Every structure is written in C-alpha cells, then in structure tokens.
Image (cartoon, rainbow, N blue to C red):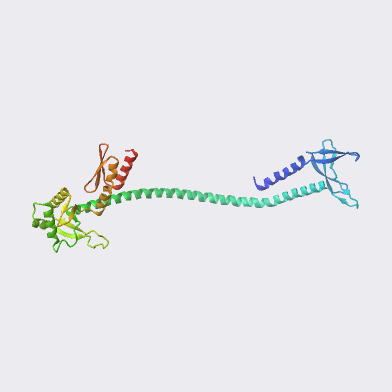
Amino acid sequence: MGPEERAQPSLSKMMEVVQTEVTVEMAVVDNSGGKKDQCSVSAVDLNLQKNQTGEPSPVLMGNDNHVFGFAQTSMVEDGGGSARLSPMEEMITKLAGEIKKGFSVSEANQAGIKEMCKILEKKIDILAKRTQLLEESLESLQEDVAQIKQDLRKSKDCEQDLCDKLERIENAARRNNLRILNISEGEEWNDIKAYCASLIKNSLQLEESEQEIVTDMQRVHRYPFRRDPARKKPQKILINFLIYALKEKILLQALKQKTLRGNGFSFEVRSDLAATTLNRKWELGNRIENFKKLGASAQLKFPATLRVMYNNKIYNLRDIKTADKFLESIRSGSL
C-alpha cells in the first residue's frame, strides 16, 4: 500500500471521529420553524446545506427527517447588527478545509511517490544482482582458500621431510668426527694433532700408540673459526678420523669413563652432530625430569631420541612437540 492510499483512510477516520465521538448540543427545529428543544445528538449524517444567506451551513439530518442544527450555528447578529459564525461552525469549516487540503496534497505527491518507488525498485534489483555476484565470488574464493590451505599443508610436510633428510645427511657426513670440550686455548702448543693424540692416549689408556692415532687423524682444528669475544668457554676442538672404527672406540671408552682428566683439567669427548640434532637433543634432555615426576622412566638414545617407558610400554619420542603432547596426555590421564 502506497503513502497516497494510506492518506485517504486517515482522513476518513478523522471524519468518523468527528461524526461519532464528538457530542454536541443540538437545537431541534421542526419543519415549520416553530418550537426549539435542546437535545444531544451523535453518529448522524453530516450534510452541507444553504442557509438563508446562501452560504453553506452544516446541519445534521436525523432519522425522523428532523433537521438538527448546531446550537448557535446559524448566522447571529451581535449588538452592532453585524453577523458572525458560531464557534462550532468555525471549527467544522476549518476541519473541512484541512481535509480538502490533505486530499489535494496527497494527490499532488502521488505521482512523485510513484516515481520514487520505481527508482527504488530499480536500485533494489541492481543491488540484488550485485549481491548474487558477490556471493558467487565469495564461494569461488572459499574454494581457492581451501585449496591453498591444502597445498600449504603439503608444502609444510614436504619441507619437514626435506629438513629431516638434510639433517640425516649432515649427521652422516659428521659420523667420523669427534668433539673435545673444555680444553683451554693455547694448551695445544704448536702441534694440535700431537697434543690431541697424547691427551686421548693417556686419558683413555688405548692400545694404539700416539703415532697410530695421529696417523688416523685426517684433520684437527678448533671451531667455530671466528671466536666470539662474549663467549667465556674455550672453543671446541674438532677431530676428523679416517677410520670410523677408531673414532667409535675412542667415543665408547670416553662414555665408559665419563670423567676424563688431562694435565690438571677435565674435558669431555662427544660425537659431532648437526646443530638441529644437538638442539633437539638438549630440549628432549630437559624433559626427562618431567617424565620422572609423573612416574615414567626416560632416557636419551643416539642421536636425539627420547625413550620413555610408561605403563609397561615403550615410546620413542623424536621431536619436542610429540614429547610435550605425551606429557600432557600423562597429566590428563587420557593415555
């Protein structure tokens, strides 16, 4: 329903209120113009008739064909002989004028309102089409995002596989190496090979002579090559052996003795591993105490695997995330 259609019922309702709700005192005038009685009339037909001067005068027609005139609705003369309208007649005339004005305004605006409705309908159609296009584009984008996420997961898995392979290759390249820690710089004199061979021979009590050990050493040097001034510990000594068996023999003997002593100092002999492997080994080693507090036994296995025994079952944890999830499962009792 348009605004012009809603205006007419509103005006009709105003007329109905005037007809049914307003109770006015009426003067009953018979057809002969004789006796006048005061009475109260409501809900009668409103008609406009001509008064004696020829001007429209509101009167009310009753069901018995009596003419009911508003009290003091006719033209009355005041003391000076001039005619004036009664208050009720003025109110009715004013209301009739407002009603006519409302109808004329509604008819004048009807064409403009219809044109505005047409423009709004066109704009709504355009917005509907654009919304449909946006929804289709959104669905396409969602499919693309899902595909990208899937490809990203595959790329991450592939990257992890490549990192694992690179770590294994690097550890394989270092399998003939040993690291000697806590040797003060300058202790090696001028011949670092002879110094390391003498240190190993005397500390580990090997059957091989110092010359045999020196001969089997392909390369010996401290690393990293550039010393960090802020680092207080001495640089490590890296030894590369020609024969893997001799390197393993020295390493096993050092692990058995645990504490190795040189000329007034203690040192350590360890395997040479990739940096990622050493970091993971260190992180896993820090979690051993947490497993023991929860009633599980844990120990590190070469090169960087945490073996945990819990509820008579053995679990091999090879990365930090897996170890943390396993700890959380034991705490929550979901394992």
The answer to whether residue 187 is left or right of residue 41 is left
**Residue 178 appears anywhere in the view:** no
The answer to whether residue 22 is left or right of residue 219 is right
Q: Residue at x 27, y 47 (%)?
A: 284
Vertical comparison of 333 with 106: above or below: above
The answer to whether residue 241 is left or right of residue 84 is left
Vertical comparison of 78 with 64: above or below: below
Vertical comparison of 296 with 120: above or below: above
Residue 332 rendering spot, x and y as whole percentages: 34, 39
Using the image as rendered, state which of residue 174 and residue 185 is in the foreground.
185
> Residue 22 lies in what quarter of the image?
top right
Residue 120 rendering spot, x and y as whole percentages: 59, 51
Residue furthest toward the bottom?
A: 190
Vertical comparison of 19 with 215: above or below: above
Total number of numbered labels?
0
Residue 307 rendering spot, x and y as whole percentages: 24, 43
Image quarter in which the N terminus is found: top right
Residue furthest toward the front?
A: 264
Using the image as rendered, state which of residue 157 and residue 103 is in the foreground.
157
Using the image as rendered, state which of residue 183 and residue 141 is in the foreground.
183
